[in-house]
Image (cartoon, grey):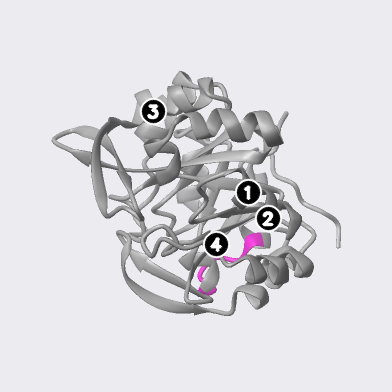
Amino acid sequence: MLTKRIIPCLDIKDGRTVKGVNFVNLRDAGDPVALATQYALEQADELVFLDISATEQKRKTLAELVLGVAAAIDIPFTVGGGISGVEDVAVLLKNGADKVSINSAAVKNPSLINELADQFGSQCIVVAIDAKQIEGEWKVHLVGGKVPTELDLFDWAKEVEQRGAGEILFTSMDHDGTKQGFANAALARLSEEVNIPIIASGGAGNVPHFIDTFTQGKADAALAASVFHFGEISIPELKHQLNQQQIAVRIDKI
């Protein structure tokens, strides 16, 4: 049985970790390297680093900061933000990223997914999808959630799988930062319609929310930020409680 993964997310702006609610009202959450080091020690399964203003500011991801984080950890590391081509990915992988996450660039140029998967392998390519419900339908949004599109979440998920993505990181903008639970109905439908792993993002507030997203939402991994950054949930305790619920997670003996 494949284990479920717990993934802290470092949203980076101006070199600092930040966290908001529904993609706005950001507050400082600490030094990225220090947080990354802490999460690796706490047995997080992976780490995601998203330079959340790179696309909006039309600049590249902070490659030097990526290098610093990668040097501090020994767990898989996904980096996203401002990636628009093969050269960007090559730099990030050289600086220590294990995978890259693309979002706006993939919607604007879907063949980029094929190109990156062919060049680096599907296992390296995560497509992040930010979506919110508009009149009952899940619509994809770009540029850190600021630009709505007419693209349907489920249609886009199927297309990115067909184009070679190895994983989907789905963030519900409606749930982001609310601590009211993940978008489990949408997650369950995604897991039925695609065959690649789905990372749930947006809404974690307590341990039962993680239990629900693995059981009801059928997610392969759960990503969270503020509950970890501000010490509301400890990863070792979370994993212990998931294990108690017969949800398979990696627990190393310390």
Q: Are marks 4 and 2 in contact (CB under 8 Å)?
A: no
Q: Estimate how packed mark 3 is, as few (under 14), some (14 to 19) or many (20 or more) residues with alpha carbons within 10 Å.
A: some
Residue depicted at x 66% and y 74%: 33
Please tell me which of labels 4 and 2 falls first in the chain.
Answer: 4
Please tell me which of labels 1 and 3 falls first in the chain.
Answer: 1
From mark 4 to mark 2, how far is it between C-alphas?
10 Å
Q: Nearer the viewer, residue 102 or 23?
A: 102
From mark 1 to mark 4, how far is it between C-alphas?
12 Å
Give residue 147's position: percent from left, percent from top.
25, 49
Please tell me which of labels 1 and 4 falls first in the chain.
Answer: 4
Callout 3 amino acid: Trp
From mark 1 to mark 3, how far is it between C-alphas?
25 Å
The residue that mark 3 highlights is 156
From mark 3 to mark 2, how far is it between C-alphas?
27 Å
Of the residues tagged 1 and 4, which is closer to the observer? 1
Residue 242 in sight? no
Identify the magenta region: 230-235
Marks counted in the figure total: 4
The residue that mark 1 highlights is 87
The residue that mark 2 highlights is 91
